[in-house]
Amino acid sequence: MKIAYSLSNNQGMEDIQAVVDLAVRAEELGFDSVWASEHVFNVSYVYDRIGDKPYYEPLTVLTYVAARTKTIGLGTSVLVLPYHNPIRLAKIAATIDVLSGGRLMLGVGVGVIEQELEAMGSPYHERGAITDETIAIMKELWTNPNPSFHGKYHNFSGMTFTPKPVQKPHIPLFIGGTSRAAIRRAARVGTGWHPTALSPEVLAQGMEYLKEQAEKVGRNPSEIAISVSAAIGSTHNHNRYSLGENPEEILERAQAYQDMGVERLLISPNTRDQDQLLPTMEMLAEVVIPKMQG
């Protein structure tokens, strides 16, 4: 199982250069990838967590990380697709993929904060339809030399789109979310399913539903990767599963995911104390990575 690290672009860190330095150190320590999160406004649970402190834009952070690193994967956990123009997003993502030598992975979702969605010009109750169309448009632009699309929100044809991503057939798309709708979307169009903070028991139920839905649409379930995001320490939310507090507990729970067939575990340090970030990363590299790769 691959071990990934969640960058703290969403934790209100004042020193963004130190966060980027962590990505460089993650590559040195053997992490599979680093991932950044997305919100535009500090609102709802985001404001409750960080108030008016900085929340940095993920694709900008990952572009900077790409320039500072050579091999580590670059992921989003997750981009809220209804916040984006799909054509512009496809262009930005393809450019990052080319710049990084084919290292980008997009975790994507529909969004949950109604106030933020409405502010971004995306009707809350249409976020699923907007997300589906965005995914279809990006795939069309990335893979077709003569792209054409006619949908509810966007129409285009007769124009060349470049650059194409380095990765073929396209940049991996990991569908975020724990709802049945998210799992069905992963089954239909996802490279993988990327849920957050699910216990092994609940994850097993989701994986069974994913298998059923994949077979229903004619896909081999084994081709849909499971990529789980989970925090260590206290999550301040009893409904969100934690990997635990101490190294032994974290390792035990990581191994439980591995035994279930999880391909990647994205670990969040879940702290706003920048002094704790590097020690936490080094502990994971010493305790968890060798066991998962061994």
Image (cartoon, grey):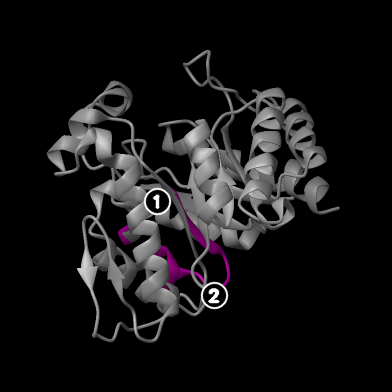
- In front of the other: 17 or 172: 172
Identify the element where label 2 is drawn: loop
Q: Which residues are magenta?
A: 60-77
- The mark closer to the camera, 1 or 2, is 2
Q: Which residue is mark 2?
A: 169
Q: CA distance from mark 1 to mark 2?
A: 35 Å
The residue at the far top in this view is 238
Q: Quadrant of residue 96?
A: bottom left
Asked whether the viewer can see residue 177, the reply is: no
Please give the name of the residue rendered at 53% of the width and 76% of the height, measured from the top-left corner: 167
- Whether residue 66 is in magenta: the answer is yes
- Whether residue 20 is in magenta: the answer is no
Name the side, left or right, on which 83 lies relative to 232.
left
Q: Which residue is mark 1?
A: 18
Identified by mark 1, the residue type is Ala
Figure check: 253 above or below 122? above
Asked whether the viewer can see residue 65, the reply is: yes
Q: Position of residue 197 (x, y in %)?
A: 56, 29
Please tell me which of labels 1 and 2 falls first in the chain: 1
- In front of the other: 39 or 8: 39
Q: Position of residue 173 (x, y in %)?
A: 50, 58
